[in-house]
Image: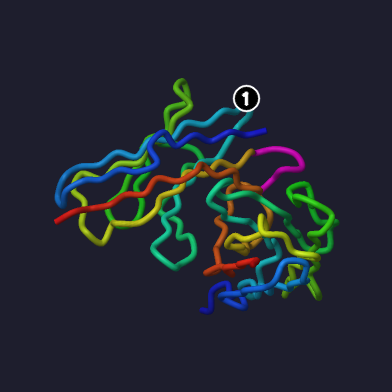
Amino acid sequence: AQSVTQLDSQVPVFEEAPVELRCNYSSSVSVYLFWYVQYPNQGLQLLLKYLSGSTLVKGINGFEAEFNKSQTSFHLRKPSVHISDTAEYFCAVSENRGSTLGRLYFGRGTQLTVWP
Amino acid sequence: GAGVSQSPSNKVTEKGKDVELRCDPISGHTALYWYRQSLGQGLEFLIYFQGNSAPDKSGLPSDRFSAERTGGSVSTLTIQRTQQEDSAVYLCASSIISQANYEQYFGPGTRLTVT
């Protein structure tokens, strides 16, 4: 089974500072990678996804992530955060095979808090 | 267009009671997923439906949990004889088809509290 690890449960940062949220996964098969954001009392919203091709993926709200196959990582970055980026961020993986097709495996989430 | 909707948004129930949670997927989406979000376990897959195929129930935690999808659209997740450990936010998602590279669109969730 898939395992997704988000190394930091909480990341506090000041406004306009850069941020990196880390994600590592375990898989011996081809995978697709996703980052979702959850604002308070809302559902999950897709930030970005890696399916194939360029390993640097750009998403909404100025976020980007880089797929590193050798390190099985998919870290999320933003060069300058805003207070409105305060939310919980989830890394997710989907296997490209068999009966688990489409099912998402999630990390535990990282709470990003941006301070003024 | 309209997104995924779930009802109720909040449900408080007594231990031992049955509850039903409803999900209305995006029109035209053939795949529907249920996940559970709890403090201790994070986000866990429960079940998914794809068209008329048999559902993948591999994530259901016990036989007290069941789900159905009528007419390929609305889905109901039923929890019988609720326990306190069932307290969680239950999220529903839908996608055009059940393939790994197709985005899942999530509803706002139903917060279940078992007292």
Residue A30 occupies which quadrant of the picture?
top right
- Magenta residues, start to end: A96-102
Q: Is residue B12 visible?
A: yes
Residue depicted at 72% across the width and 75% down the height? B74
Residue depicted at 14% across the width and 50% down the height? A16
Query: What residue would you read off at disc 1?
Result: A28
- Callout 1: few (<14), some (14-19), or many (20+) C-alpha neighbours within 10 Å? few
Residue A4 lies, with reference to residue B78, above or below; the image says above
Residue A46 lies, with reference to residue A74, above or below; the image says below
Residue B78 occupies which quadrant of the picture?
bottom right
Q: Position of residue B104 (x, y in %)?
A: 57, 58
Residue B72 lies, with reference to residue B59, above or below; the image says below
Q: Check the residue under mark 1 and report the chain it is in.
A: A
Q: Position of residue A1 (x, y in %)?
A: 67, 33
Q: How many marks?
A: 1
- Image color mode: rainbow
Q: Quadrant of the C terminus of chain A?
A: bottom left
Residue A71 lies, with reference to residue A56, above or below; the image says above
Q: Is residue A100 left or right of residue B111?
A: right
